[in-house]
Image (cartoon, grey):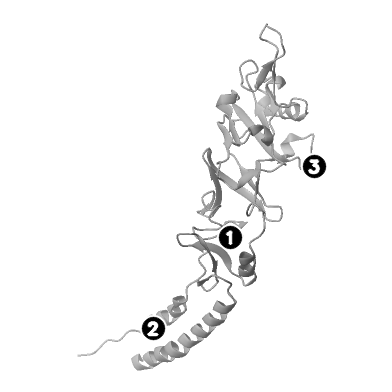
Amino acid sequence: MELSYPSVPLLSIFLFLLPSLISAQVCQRNCGKEILKYPFGSDPGCGDPRFQPHVTCSQQKLTFTTHTGSYLVTSIDYTNQVIYISDPTMSTCSYTVPSKGFGLDWDAPFTFDDSTIFALVDCSINSSSICKSNGYDDGNNSKLLCDQGTPICSLLYSCSPISTINLPISSCCVYTPVNLGPSFEMDLQKLQCPSYTGFYNFNDQQSDPEKWNYGIALKYKFSVTNDYPSSCAACERSYGFCGYNGAYNSFICNCPNGINTTTDCFFTSNYNNGLRNGIAWLIYPMAWSLVWFFL
């Protein structure tokens, strides 16, 4: 009776898989094309716990979520602490669609950036809650309370999607974030405006609304004092990724070797190199002995 032994290719596969015994870094540094840095993270336990419920990575897409919906994060300006999002229900110079509006969660660590400009479209001049009468009784002299003195509305209403439905320019007004009040809520149904548009940059083309950067710019802060956490800075200098764990969301530094520390990754990198070399000295001679035995 002839005994059978594992073939050399099978042993080769075994040897190839040995390095995977050392785990990889859990917190990813990218979500699709977007670079991830503190305070944002790819998974629960990564970044700042205050930001995790609002900005998440799913299927390599970075998403901003509030009670009014989920919105694609188009870019992040880490220097100025601003994220840019797009709303698929927002009208632009290319198309106009009905919308229910946009709002921020009251406990979210975000506010509207000063660059964000909203314009309400096709508002009911006689019955909208942002209207007031000019003092006449005929009911036809109401005026929108938001700003109608800028050329933004006339430029927007020159766009083909809006101009073809013949909306009066008087039914449009600029609605800056400060007008949203402390709740940061733009309820279009309550305002009796079917749609809105938002942009954050004229892109050096103030007279051409087709070239404007449409979307919403949101400002974020690290804390009340807006100081960058020193523990996180030390973690990042050692190529770690800032995160948190435990019942109290305590700070951790997630290192490239997969180990979490409460300081930085300099010690763990040296420890891991020693551990990796130790494992290699023990396992690889044993593995090659098996190869020669089965040959």
Front: mark 2 or 3:
3
Bin the neighbour count of mark 2 within 10 Å (Cα to Cα): few under 14, some 14-19, many 20 and up: some
Locate the N terminus by quadrant: bottom left
Residue 74 coordinates in the image, percent (x, y): 63, 48
Type of residue at label 3? Asp
Type of residue at label 1? Asn
Q: Residue at 62% across / 72% down in the picture? A: 238
Type of residue at label 2? Leu
- Cα distance between the residues tagged 2 and 1: 35 Å
- SS at circle 2: helix
In the image, 219 versus 223, the foreground residue is 223
In the image, 203 versus 103, the foreground residue is 103
Please tell me whether residue 119 is drawn above or below residue 24 in the rendered image.
above
Q: Which mark is residue 11?
A: 2
- Cα distance between the residues tagged 2 and 3: 63 Å
Instruction: Compare marks 2 and 1 and give the one earlier in the sequence.
Output: 2
**Residue that carries the numbered disc 3 in the rendered image:** 204
Locate the C terminus by quadrant: bottom left
